[in-house]
Image: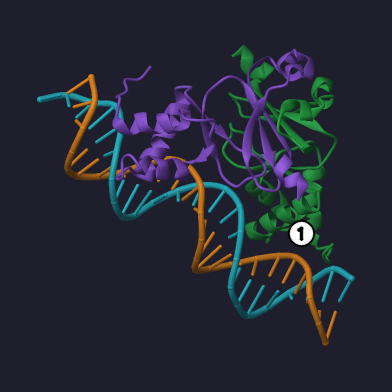
Chain colours: A purple, B green, C orange, D cyan
Amino acid sequence: MKKSRNTRQRGVILGILTAGAVHLTAEEVCLEARKILPSISLGTVYRNLNFLREQGLAREIRSSDAGCTRFEATRDPHAHFHCRRCHIVRDIPLPEAVAGIRWPEAGPIASVSSLDLHVMGDCPGCADT
Amino acid sequence: MKKSRNTRQRGVILGILTAGAVHLTAEEVCLEARKILPSISLGTVYRNLNFLREQGLAREIRSSDAGCTRFEATRDPHAHFHCRRCHIVRDIPLPEAVAGIRWPEAGPIASVSSLDLHVMGDCPGCADT
DNA sequence: GTAATTGCAAAAGATTTGCCCCATT
DNA sequence: AATGGGGCAAATCTTTTGCAATTAC
């Protein structure tokens, strides 16, 4: 693994992703980080998000729903729920039925490294309206 | 539903998406379309892809893997397999286990409108290498 | 004839990159 | 001291949009 340094910026960014189960855009991470390091630049945020992703500490989330890429800290396997009305993204448990699938059953797959499951629908708040 | 016209461009684009289980970027759709309509513009391709999506005839696919958005014609529910090496995207059957889930079991969900399941891994060709 | 749609080019976003300086090791 | 990383700005890439000309109905 490549040599890397423990910069203030990198620590802050990882801290932001780790605090709470948030799903932030790069820009949101940057705004958040500026509360602590007012001069951090968006370029640095992107560079670190990519770095953290390569290290396996962060993941990208892209739904077919919301516009741009969001990031989260890597944690236990889980799925994402997207409310099609208010566009909130929430973690939901990965149903056991999914976790238990023997994937090669599903066709031309030699081996599986990860899963992305997105569930689109209405959240309780929006469904009432 | 809004009034709409049956233009040559729109027909060609839908034809491209429908032919074979392809997953193309907007640019690829444009190149393909130019074999038939040499002067079609990328803007028109985007406009039509969005139109077809709103009509429910096409879907966007965004993986956390490959770079940009791909499009496919709407068909029976299925999942997507992404080879992390050659970046091919293939349809795979949606496992029954997933299709059968009672989603409200999964937490704060009032109702579900659709699912996106992406499986990342190696395809047989790449696994040998 | 009318209005939706196209082609083109400019605009808008999102993300990456070059360069020079600073800070971690 | 050496060099990975940061800040800034320019460059890239993808997608959207304004507008005048065109075409389906």
- Residue B70: image location, x then y, percent: 67, 42
Left or right: residue D20 compared with residue B73: left
Is residue B26 at least partly visible in the picture?
yes
Residue type at numbered disc 1: Gln
Q: Looking at the image, how many numbered discs can be counted on the residues?
A: 1
Instruction: Characterize the local packing of mark 1: few (<14), some (14-19) or many (20 or more) Cα atoms within 10 angstroms.
Output: some
Q: Mark 1 lies on which chain?
A: B
Residue in view at x 75 percent, y 38 percent? B22
**In-front residue for pair B117/B106:** B106
- Residue A20: image location, x then y, percent: 51, 30
- Residue B127: image location, x then y, percent: 63, 14
**Residue highlighted by disc 1:** B9
Residue in view at x 41 percent, y 45 percent? A31
> Taking B13 as reference, is A36 above or below it?
above
Label 1: which secondary element: helix
**In-front residue for pair B97/B47:** B97
> Taking C22 as reference, is B44 above or below it?
below
- Residue B58: image location, x then y, percent: 77, 46
Left or right: residue A7 compared with residue B116: left
**In-front residue for pair B43/B63:** B63
Is residue A123 at least partly visible in the picture?
no
In the rendered view of the protein, which quadrant contains the N terminus of chain A? top left
**In-front residue for pair A3/B11:** A3
Left or right: residue B62 compared with residue A51: right
